[in-house]
Image (cartoon, rainbow, N blue to C red):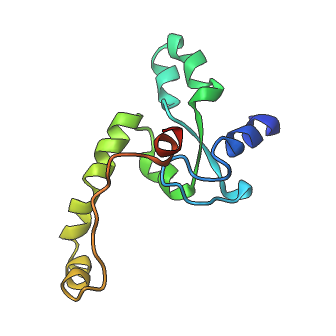
Amino acid sequence: MKKSIREAVYRKYNGHCAYCGKDIEYEDMQVDHQLPKMFEEIHEMWKEQVNSFENLFPACRRCNHYKRAMNLDHFRDYMLKLHERIEKDYVAKVAIDYGIVTIKPFDGKFYFEEVQE
C-alpha cells in the first residue's frame, strides 16, 4: 500500500480506531478492509470495491484481530455478544461479585458511525 494512502486512512478518523475509537499512533495503526479481502478471492467483481479507499479503515491491533475476516454485520453481532462471553469467565465472575468490574453490553455502534452522525 502506498504511504500516501496509508496516511489518508489514518487521517480518516483523526488518529482513532474506526471501531473502538481508541487513539492510535500512526505506526501502530492497521489498515482494515471493512469488506474483507477474502471477498476479492471469492469473485473478481468484488476486487475494485474491496480495494477502494472507502473500504479502508484505520484499526487498532486489537479490533483488527477480533474483526479478522468478518464483514461489518458479523463483527457487530460478535461484539453484541461479547459481554456474555466475558461473564462466563470465572475470574470475571469473581471481579463482578466484588464490584471490581462491571460488564456493559456493546450498544451496537462503532466509532466511525458515531462521528458520522
**Horizontal and vertical percent for residue 79?**
33, 51
Residue at image point 44% right, 46% down: 110
**Horizontal and vertical percent for residue 37?**
53, 30
Residue at image point 34% right, 43% down: 76
Q: Residue furthest bottom?
A: 98
How many numbered dots are placed on residues in this image? 0
Q: Nearer the viewer, residue 40 or 19?
A: 19
**Horizontal and vertical percent for residue 58?**
61, 45
Instruction: Name which quarter of the figure residue 104 lies in.
Output: bottom left
Above-or-below relation of 23 to 74: below
Q: Nearer the viewer, residue 114 or 73?
A: 114
Residue at image point 27% right, 59% down: 105
Judged left or right of residue 45, residue 74 is left
Instruction: Name which quarter of the figure residue 102 lies in.
Output: bottom left
Above-or-below relation of 64 to 104: above
**Horizontal and vertical percent for residue 4?**
81, 36
Residue at image point 30% right, 79% down: 101
Above-or-below relation of 97 to 85: below
